[in-house]
Image (cartoon, rainbow, N blue to C red):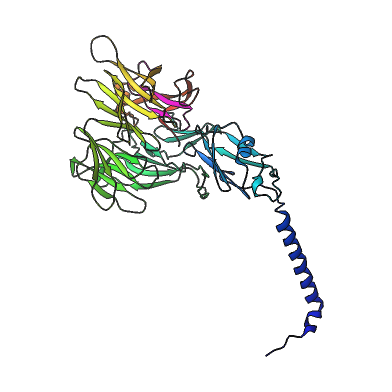
Amino acid sequence: MTRISVRSFSQPLDRAALTVMFVLAVLTGLLLLTGDHTLPKVRDFSWQNRQVGADDRSFVLSFNRLMNWQSVTQHLQITPQLTGKTSWAGRRLAYTLDQPVLYGRAFQVELAKAEDDALVEADNQPKQMQPFSGQFRSRDRVYLYIGVEPAEVGRLVMQNLTLNRKTILTPANLVVSEFKPYSSGDRVLFSANQRAKDNQSSFDPQLYIVSTGLQIHAPDTPLAPKQAAGKVKLVLDNRDYQLLKFDLAADGQNIVVQRAAKANQGQTSLWLLRPDQDPQLLSQQSGGDFLIAPDSNTLVIAQGQGLAVSALSAQQDLATLDFLPQFGMVLSFASDGSAAAMVKFNSDYTRSLFLVTNQGTQKQLFKTTGSIVRAEFDPTKQMLYCLLTKLLPGEGYNEQPYLAAIDVATGKLTPLLDLPGQREVQISLAPDGSALIFDQVVAAPTEQGKASNLQTEQGQAIATSNLWLLPITAPGSAQVTPPQPLAAGFHARWMP
């Protein structure tokens, strides 16, 4: 057995090590006797240097110790002001907004003079925290439209109102007919025809994706590499089928397309597209309108005299989960999927707008002899902004479109703006509920229309069109200011 000599501890290095150990032991004892003297502070802010959207409704502050939450709530300041409610668990405080953030703004979060929990201190003396300052911003105000000006005819154009910057996304050889932006904001799914030399392209579109150049750093999402705007990728060709309609799921993983077989034009079918997978047939016979629900895995489709609610699955045909025989059309969903706006076609030739919730509630909001064209929920789910028509007196069947707001709780309808002389109108509600965009299409004369690539949803040739912005004074209200001109274009859609 090896003996350890006492003299081995007499070396200078050994003596130094023993001294350090002794000092550390003394300090540890003093700390245990007198308590922790480090100042309370914020360790992490979940929205730090992030971009947030209308669906981001709460942030979290994490502290290095237990805090007096009443003191934290009292001293927390957000500039510009964002009202909300606080809740906490352990060392984490969550702040949930009452309203979605308005887009195109920078925010400052400051916290100073808040105290920790005195009960965890040995001397029961609360300590003031180290001042904290954080920042985040909301997404830019951006919308897309199909251009009508000479250099933009039929092309997809992106307008950033926050930066006052316009970007033409698609090449000149493609004429865009429909588009849907991804929720991430970095891409747009669109259908387009090849532009013919004689400017008389037949309707036989293909499906593409184009990059926007936007780089959105959302909470809890890693920052993806930025891709230049205008990079186009073919998603689905038109070799054997003609593309009729499509919809994009909120998560960007599912695309449902309706196609007609070129060998048999009377046969239409639904197909499911997923990233890096071949198209999967969902239904052999399907000619009705459809929408993917916000959960990204449920499809609502018009079938016969009602609406079928079906599960999306690449392993089997559409599996019907529910059938709503009283409704003929679904217009939109609340962003969280808790409610939908549906249309009932009544036996007396009137139409009713219904609020249908995921709890089974079916509430009639509005009944009209005119048409219910579109309806969109505002972010608070308190208001539906609608495009409606009313019958004009006189001979014949003449309708005049108008914009209106309907209070979901009371069913009260407030007209916002008449659109005289407009046979076809498209509307889009900003994701933060701050404004509506609508277009004012001018039809082309018969001869000019023959040489036009641009058409409305009803196949009417477009000579030109103007976009208008209708500001909403307070999100979730029926208060608006006069419309403002935006650009020359049609079929505008806000980016999420």
**Residue under the point 38% across and 20% down:** 404
Which picture quadrant has residue 290? top left
> Residue 22 location in percent, x, y?
77, 68
Which picture quadrant has residue 132? top right
Q: Which residue lies furthest to the bottom in this view?
A: 1
Residue 264 or residue 393, whichever sits in front: 393
Residue 169 or residue 63, whichever sits in front: 63
> Residue 386 location in percent, x, y?
37, 24
- Image quarter where the N terminus lies is bottom right
> Residue 86 location in percent, x, y?
55, 38
- Image quarter where the C terminus lies is top left
Number of residue marks: 0
> Residue 332 location in percent, x, y?
35, 32
Is residue 37 shown left or right of residue 187? right
On the question of residue 462 being in view, the answer is yes
Is residue 269 shown left or right of residue 172? left
Q: Which residue lies furthest to the top in this view?
A: 394
Residue 430 forms part of the magenta stretch: yes
**Residue under the point 70% across and 43% down:** 128
Which picture quadrant has residue 206? top left
- Where 27 sits versus 184, above or below? below
**Residue under the point 75% across and 61% down:** 27
The stretch in magenta equals: 418-442
Residue 339 forms part of the magenta stretch: no
